[in-house]
Image (cartoon, rainbow, N blue to C red):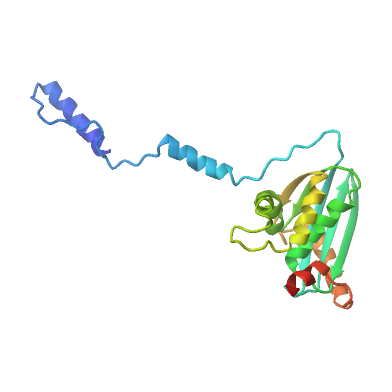
Amino acid sequence: MCAHARGKKKIVAARDSGAKMTTKTPARQHTGCRTKSKARYQTHQQSRTNFKTPVVEFNPQLKTVKVFSDGSCLKNPGGPGGYGIVLQYRGEERELSEGFHSTTNNRMEMMGALIALERLKFSCNVILHSDSQYLKNGMTLWMKGWKLNGWITADKKPVKNVDLWKRLDLAASRHNVRWNWVKGHAGHRENEICDRLAKIAAYAAADTPHKKDAGFLVQNDK
């Protein structure tokens, strides 16, 4: 029981017994009871809401395509690396992959999603699954701020992989994309397929020195 409640109980008991009450209780006495003000609670809730992934509305008139992508880099950074993609539409499934002799894991994660979106000839509703938090957060949380700041991060540094982010921004703008994160190496069928495709492509690229990720080379020459 809080001190305020105990004090109130004593006052009521004294009044009922007819005793004279000479002690005045302050109108707002600190009781030691912890409470959260309504304004503070609302501010807390608003701050949580600001970090939620935006809800993307689908157009019922458009086709809905499921995309699964993954990236791999046998030696990160520097490569070789590759990406794997699985596209699904009305029971049909298509696999895509490509490898590069010099690249990074993050660039391959991005490239997988990018190529999948660019391969869709018409505007679609897209549910894109990836095990890359870097990709998902970049597209749903960070992109808007980067663009407003001229592709500069909150730490006042140039955004890494800006060539791919710009292409992803353009490719995604043609579709209604819901970005969904899945845990990697957890038995997710399509993610496992993409991982296998990406690794095969990466090993193949190890024997083809001419197959380079141009954006990676430009970024690392600066």
**Total count of labels:** 0
Left-right relation of 34 to 187: left
Of residue 90 and residue 150, the one placed in the foreground of this image is 150
- Which residue is located at x 86 percent, y 42 percent? 123
Left-right relation of 40 to 193: left
Of residue 49 and residue 154, the one placed in the foreground of this image is 154
- Which residue is located at x 89 percent, y 59 percent? 96
The residue furthest front is 150
In the displayed structure, 185 sits above or below 94; it is below
Answer yes or no: is residue 38 visible: yes
The residue furthest left is 20
Of residue 150 and residue 178, the one placed in the foreground of this image is 150
- Which residue is located at x 8 percent, y 24 percent? 19
Q: Which of the 4 image quarters holds residue 68?
A: bottom right
Left-right relation of 36 to 176: left
Image quadrant containing the C terminus: bottom right
